């Protein structure tokens, strides 16, 4: 029987998961609005540099879209869980200069009108674009997930931190190539690779304990042309391991498969081909999407030998994989010292800027320990 204190924590964490699902859907709405509304879409895709750049507009609108989402999530979570303020981290800085050299700090204000006024100052008084963004930021979508609502998790909000990747695979989001998703198939690129990632970790140990992934561009209605998305979530802590996804069933005649970045080192590709076979290597865009492919069983393992991902890329999907019995290991450390899982609470003090939070040793995302060990044996001595 739960004590009163444990019951309080359990209810609080159920509330946190519900809130993260809601703000992730709101973020997805912002991402869709930026592509669907002409005044915002023009800013998104017509970003120029040098002499061709329109000096009236913010220096990097695609980054502004990221920042708006990030600050919206930070605002909404901090408002409901004030004990987490100061531990809600994101990829982007929220300080901007508009084309006139004026410095503006992007925040979410208490009213839609105030937020629109602030955004207009960044967009050099483009009030139409600013109003469209502000409306999406302040509109709370209805999200329902019966399994998440019934969840009891003994966690204290004051023990937690959050990593936000507002739009993972931004290049795919900007390019905007549309693919028709087929059940059970991995696609190498396109809008569906762009994800909203929100990961929760323990401040003390850095373990990822809760993750929410929203895929804003999952289905396009052929009649209206409007997009809808889908969400995924997982919780792994204190003996609780539960997820919106069930553990994918292995297909005996398919054999294990690996997803990689197309820019992966040739020595890694050759080693994996020698073990798995050339037809078992697949390629996709976006670190978050590649880990999602492992979560969904579209691939069995994701290998990255470079330190080109960051804590905000891996925290959310790592929590989902843990809930399914898998994880995300540091590749370099696992090759040296045995399996070492990524953690999320400590920066590399010898590095500067974003590099302080990079996954410097590369990573291996897996659903099955045996597959992880096979990859480590295959790559040992090659890197």
Image (cartoon, rainbow, N blue to C red):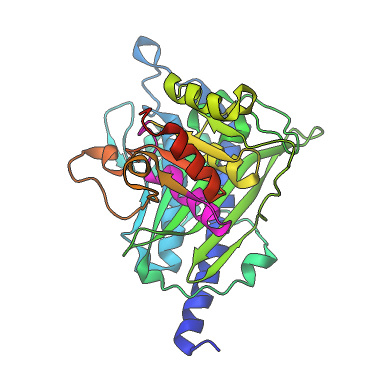
Q: Would residue 323 be counted in the magenta stretch?
A: yes
Task: Say if 220 sits above or below 366 in the image.
Answer: above
At 32% from the left edge and 41% from the top edge, which residue is drawn?
336
Q: Can the viewer see residue 116 in this picture?
A: no
In the rendered image, the quadrant that contains the C terminus is top left
The x, y position of residue 36, in whole percent, is 63, 33
Image coords of residue 276 (percent x, y):
59, 30
Q: In the image, which residues are magenta?
A: 306-327
Q: Residue furthest right?
A: 223
Measured as percent of width and height from the top left, residue 89 is found at: 36, 51
x and y percent of residue 158 in the render?
36, 70
| Residue 178 inside the magenta-drawn segment | no
Q: In this orientation, does residue 22 appear? A: yes
**Residue furthest to the left:** 350
When the figure is inspected, residue 210 is found, relative to residue 62, above or below; the finding is below
The N terminus appears in which quarter of the rendering? bottom right
Along the line of sight, which residue is nearer the eye, 115 or 7?
7
């Amino acid at each position: 029987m739960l004590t009163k204190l444990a019951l309080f924590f359990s209810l609080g964490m159920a509330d946190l998961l519900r809130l993260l699902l809601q703000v992730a859907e709101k973020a997805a709405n912002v991402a869709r609005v930026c592509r669907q509304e002409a005044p915002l879409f023009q800013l998104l895709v017509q970003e120029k540099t040098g002499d061709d750049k329109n000096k009236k507009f913010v220096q990097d609108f695609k980054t502004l879209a990221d920042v708006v989402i990030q600050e919206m999530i930070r605002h909404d979570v901090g408002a409901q869980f004030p004990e987490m303020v100061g531990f809600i981290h994101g990829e982007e800085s929220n300080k901007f200069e508009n084309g006139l050299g004026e410095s503006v700090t992007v925040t979410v204000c208490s009213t839609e009108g105030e937020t629109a006024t602030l955004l207009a100052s960044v967009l050099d008084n483009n009030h139409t674009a600013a109003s469209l963004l502000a409306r999406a930021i302040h509109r709370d979508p209805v999200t329902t997930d019966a399994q998440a609502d019934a969840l009891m998790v003994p966690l204290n909000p004051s023990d937690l931190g959050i990593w936000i990747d507002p739009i993972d695979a931004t290049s795919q989001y900007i390019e905007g190539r549309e693919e028709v998703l087929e059940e059970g198939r991995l696609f190498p690129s396109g809008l569906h690779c762009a994800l909203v990632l929100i990961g929760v970790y323990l401040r003390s140990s850095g373990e990822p304990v809760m993750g929410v992934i929203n895929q804003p561009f999952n289905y396009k209605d052929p009649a209206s042309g409007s997009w809808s998305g889908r969400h995924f979530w997982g919780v792994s802590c204190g003996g609780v391991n539960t997820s919106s996804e069930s553990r994918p069933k292995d297909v005996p005649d398919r054999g294990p498969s690996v997803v990689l970045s197309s820019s992966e080192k040739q020595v890694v590709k050759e080693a994996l081909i020698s073990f798995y076979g050339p037809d078992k290597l697949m390629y996709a865009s976006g670190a978050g999407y590649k880990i999602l492919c492992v979560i969904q069983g579209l691939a069995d393992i994701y290998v990255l030998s470079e330190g080109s991902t960051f804590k905000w890329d891996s925290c959310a999907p790592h929590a989902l994989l843990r809930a399914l019995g898998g994880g995300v290991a540091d590749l370099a450390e696992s090759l040296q010292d045995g399996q070492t899982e990524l953690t999320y609470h400590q920066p590399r003090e010898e590095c500067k800027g974003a590099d302080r939070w990079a996954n410097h040793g590369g990573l291996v995302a897996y659903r099955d320990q045996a597959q992880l060990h096979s990859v480590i044996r295959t790559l040992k001595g090659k890197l």
